[in-house]
Image (tube, rainbow, N blue to C red):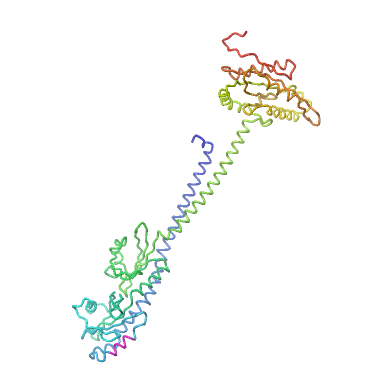
Amino acid sequence: MSGPFSRYRLAIIVALLLLAGIVVNAGLYYQQGSQDIRHGIVEQGLPLTGDTIFSEIDKSILRPLSVASLMANDTFLLDWLKEGERAPDRVARYLAAINGRYGITGSFLVSESTHRYYYAGGVLKTVSPADREDRWYFHSRQTKQAYDIALDEDMTNGGKTTLFINHRMLDGKGKLLGVIGVGLPQMELSAQLAAHEQRFQRRIYFIDQNGRIVLDSSGAAPRKLAEQPGLGDLASAILAGGAEPQKLEYSRDGNRYLLTSRLLPELGWHLLVEQNETRALQPLHAALQINLAINTAILLLVLIAVVATLQHHQQRMRQMATTDPLTGCLNRLAFMELLPGWLRACQRASAEPQLLMIDIDHFKQVNDKHGHQVGDQVLREIAELLRTQLRGGDLLIRWGGEEFVALVTSHGEDDALAERLRNIVARHVMNASGQALTITISIGLCQWLPPETLEAAVARADLALYAAKQGGRNRVSHAQPYQPIDEPVA
């Protein structure tokens, strides 16, 4: 990794590893959570709902079925049919007494001998094989089962769609005497299913042995299960199932559904309870997104804090590596790094570099007489005095010991700055452990022009500084002009 991010490579790698850990952990959490929800739906939710619905169906349908069975074996009705159906009003009153119990809205009896259709109001009609509305009777009289259940219009109740339980009536020798039964309004049953669906948040419906959805919360007309989207492939498995619940699943419109199917032998229908697994997982999915967002935000804040700390630490390390800790001046390492850019700035300004080699006069004597603490104080105060006279683009370097180098810009052999530096130091009175102390400096001034190297310029300035020292100190001495190697010195 290179470029501006190379300094933060370790932090970025750690952040990526942590982010990967967060994503993996969230994925495992989501997987485990979805498995738990799925297990809860399939193993507990759907079966318990099926049991509850079965119990409710026992009240809504199976009890009327029991009533129809008792009516079919009632000796009064059997004898009345055998004796020639005298006094039809007696049967009408009997049937009227049944209505209103267990949700029954229409009870009836059809005689095999006369084909008369009796209901609470008397004789409704005479059934005929030629009448399409009467085919249910001729189907019931031929079935081998004791009863059958069918949806049909109740002509005695305004033509409302009704669930009829048709029970065969037989004498002691098994001869068919008629068909008796009760009717339950489809809309009331559908409303009960709708209430259960609202309560359990699951879809509930019934299919008959012909694979038709005969009862659901919509109250719609029977329709084939095989033609329903997603359910068509399961129709055969559902119809082949028994009383033990079977677990199935299918997909529709991008959603996954889990369902259980069980046969209700008393009705001959299959009870189906299904739940949208995709919708059930939405709270978990939302929790996962929130968890990821929170963890990512925390990670981002931690990363920002780490990067800020690293940046501060790097700046501190760089400052320590490039700055003299005693005087705050640049050291030689920083000087060499900044020098190319500083020279380019001089070229753009059409200015000439000027190098000042500065040395504190009699500094060893200060240390010997006053101690190194005072010597350090002298270095700090002189460095600060020099900085106050330099311009923003000038460089002040602690060259070593009591020597400083100032790299400034000029437009010729100008020693005004050097003299100003010498004067301000000479006039400054220091407090050295309660004693007044005056320090002076000597300066070797060198005009640095290409193609002279830095080493050559420093050497010329050093010679000028030596001359200042020899000349009595506290003075500025100009270096000899630069002479290329291939030119003889005048």
The residue drawn where x is 36% and y is 79% is 103
Query: x and y percent of residue 415 in the render?
Result: 67, 19
Please state which of residues 121 and 115 is positioned toward the viewer in this rendering: 121
Query: x and y percent of residue 174 in the render?
Result: 23, 84
In this rendering, would 347 be left or right of 84?
right
In this rendering, would 76 be left or right of 283?
left
Q: Quadrant of residue 473?
A: top right
Tell me the magenta residue range.
Answer: 89-96
432 is higher (above) or lower (below) than 35: above
Residue found at the far right of this picture: 435
259 is higher (above) or lower (below) than 104: above
The residue drawn where x is 73% and y is 25% is 425
- Quarter that holds the C terminus: top right
7 is higher (above) or lower (below) than 478: below
Residue 20 is inside the magenta segment: no
Q: Quadrant of residue 411?
A: top right
The residue drawn where x is 54% and y is 44% is 303
Residue found at the far left of this picture: 130
Query: x and y percent of residue 259 in the render?
Result: 36, 64
